[in-house]
Amino acid sequence: MKTTASNELRALLPALNNKSYFNYGGQGPLPTSSLNAIVESWKKIQELGPFTGCVWPYITNEIESTREMLAIQCGIPHNRLALTENVTSGCVLPLWGLPFSSNDRLLISDCEHPGVVAACQELAYRKGLSIDILPIQMLRQGVTEQESIHSELLTLLDKKLERRTKLVVVSHLLWNTGQLIPIKAIAKSLSNHPNKPFLLVDAAQSFGQIPLTEEASSADIYAFTGHKWALGPEGLGGVAISERVLSEANPTLIGWRSLQNENINYTNYSNLFHPDSRRFEIATSCVPLLAGLRCSLRLLEEAGTVQNRISQIKKSGKEFWDLLNSIDGVRTILKGPPPAGLISFEFTHKHLTKKVVKLLGGQNLWIRDLESPRCLRACVHITTTNKEIITLSKAIEEIAISEVI
């Protein structure tokens, strides 16, 4: 049974009125009250005048109150939280400012998003770096074997780390298999490495869904977005940055928000940039989105603590995982129940996978397909009902039985 708070939140999501939505890992639906908050903020800015002396205190308060809220979510001081437009920019802007030397090595997991991988490849090309691969896609034990995963992953990490490894890139929750990665344990292991590699974490699938304060505070770069599990608007996210990065990294893409003072002395380079996370912010962003994200985060908090929410998500995820494993011709990617709301699966008849999304969409059941591994992914949130889970599993079973698309 869904809680009253979850049902109340669901009632605020118009995107769920006419469909069964399982794509929170791609983009979450926006609550009506968050949309209204965005519109009201836009109106306020126009009433004050978009570029007047009256508007700046309002804009500054919007920015800093959002920064403070996101910093609290990450368990870090607000000076270590930079506002971004998306996960990729949150990863790439600090990454490209790190102090690399020729022949340094990057260790990247084989489950990273193409945008982050491409950024690392281009960085390696320009800086003369080498890339090594950390093979974690094979870790598919699920939530019941989390301790075993910790041990196996740290063994893999130890084997793949080189003397000149300067950076490790890994996701907190893998977007393709749904496996949870022990970020805090990785950070501890890296701290004992002679080269003390930086740790960059893609948190696209964790923010708004699972507890993350220990992970965000132990990583060097922990980048997230508000438009997935946090049910916020697209175009707004954040990145938690370690003190080490703040002291050693230079700004990369630069704008007026990176600067301590707009009155630049053309001949004096010193002290141009903010000493804190703001050096990785660039220029004009959409201020009204800030009000929308804060509203969505408050609605999630009203629906329950993050521990309560993930407990509910895991319960729904296990229900769906159990149903999938009862279907002949279907197998889940994880061998155990999922640790969060991402459930990936495949048909034993591979030719079925390609057109399943379209077929289910015709029944107003929306999931997505992935390339590596080649599979299908459905996401459950606290707003997902038991009826929707059963309906989706029955539709998948009918496809498996027919074996014809």
Image: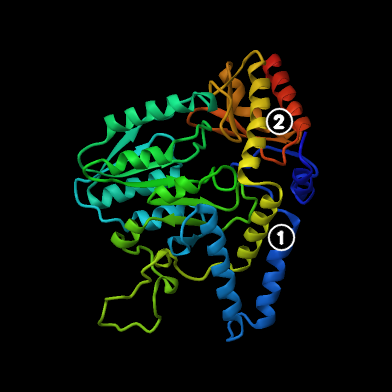
Judging by the rendered image, the residue that carries numbered circle 1 is: 35
How many other residues sit within 10 Å of disc 1, few (<14), some (14-19) or many (≥20)?
many
Query: Is the residue 357 above or below the residue 301 in the image?
Result: above
Image coordinates of residue 181 in percent, x first then y, are: 45, 35
Image coordinates of residue 375 in percent, x first then y, are: 55, 27
Looking at the rendered structure, the kind of residue marked 2 is Leu
For the C terminus, give its image quadrant: top right
31 relative position to 82: left or right: right
Q: Residue at x 59, y 85 (%)?
A: 52
How many other residues sit within 10 Å of disc 2, few (<14), some (14-19) or many (≥20)?
some
Residue 281 image-quadrant placement? bottom left
176 relative position to 100: left or right: right
For the N terminus, give its image quadrant: top right
Image coordinates of residue 210 in percent, x first then y, are: 57, 42
Q: Which numbered disc flags the more N-terminal residue, 2 or 1?
A: 1
Looking at the rendered structure, the kind of residue marked 1 is Leu
Q: Which of 303 and 352 is in front in this view?
A: 303
Q: Residue at x 67, y 26 (%)?
A: 320
Residue 360 is labelled as: 2
Query: Is the residue 96 above or below the residue 310 in the image?
Result: below
Q: Nearer the viewer, residue 261 or 89?
A: 261
Q: Is residue 405 visible?
A: no
As helix, strand or loop, the secondary structure at mark 1 comes to helix
Query: Is the residue 55 above or below the residue 342 in the image?
Result: below
Q: Is residue 9 visible?
A: yes
Query: Is the residue 49 above or below the residue 188 in the image?
Result: below
Residue 140 is labelled as: none
As helix, strand or loop, the secondary structure at mark 2 comes to helix
Image coordinates of residue 113 in percent, x first then y, are: 46, 42
Q: Residue at x 62, y 50 (%)?
A: 230
